[in-house]
Amino acid sequence: MIVYIIGPISGREDFNRSEFERARSIIERHGCRAIIPLDLTQDIQGHRCPAYLWTVAMCRCLDALEGADAIIALPGWKNSRGANIEIRKAKQMGLSISYWR
């Protein structure tokens, strides 16, 4: 099973990497493959244009979501524009959605 992890990134220290990595570690211990958005954008981190970075990241994330079986939403996802877009798409796709506590 492939689990896509969503959550807040913009404005968070180190793009909230520690929370994404913690969730990934637990999910993978249960035998699932976990995808985090930060894996998809390593080649564009540090780009000078925040709008470019966000747009490219969202395109890549939405593409990756298409290959997922389920998603897990980290705390704070409701305050993330990108995570809200991903939740809407996941619902349209009929994916299982769980909320991390």
Image (cartoon, helix red, strand yellow):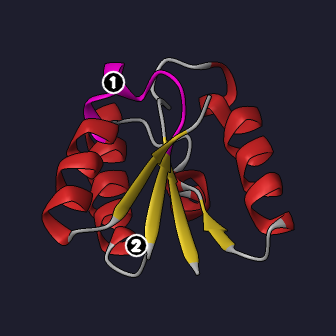
Task: Tell me the SS state at disc 2.
Answer: helix
State the image coordinates of residue 20 (x, y, percent, origin top left).
Answer: 67, 43
**Residue drawn where x is 57% and y is 19% of the image:** 12
Q: As shown in the figure, which amino acid type bears the numbered disc 1?
A: Lys
The question of residue 79 being in magenta is answered with yes
Q: Are marks 1 and 2 in contact (CB under 8 Å)?
A: no
Q: Residues within 10 Å of mark 2 (few under 14, many from 20)?
A: some
Can you identify the residue that label 2 sits on? 64
Q: Residues within 10 Å of mark 1 (few under 14, many from 20)?
A: some
Can you identify the residue that label 1 sits on? 78
- Image position of 91 (left or right of 80): left
| Mark before the other along the chain sequence, 1 or 2 | 2
Task: Tell me the SS state at disc 1.
Answer: helix
As displayed, is residue 13 above or below residue 71? above
- Image position of 65 (left or right of 32): left
As measured in the structure, the alpha-carbon distance from the residue carrying label 1 to the one carrying label 2 is 20 Å
The image quarter in which residue 93 lies: bottom left
The image quarter in which residue 81 lies: top left
**Magenta residues, start to end:** 73-82
**Residue drawn where x is 47% and y is 21% of the image:** 76
**Residue drawn where x is 31% and y is 73% of the image:** 63
Quarter of the image that includes the C terminus: top right
**Residue 2 - label:** none
The image quarter in which residue 90 lies: bottom left
State the image coordinates of residue 59 (x, y, percent, origin top left).
Answer: 27, 62
- Image position of 43 (left or right of 73): right
* Nearer to the camera, 36 or 10: 36
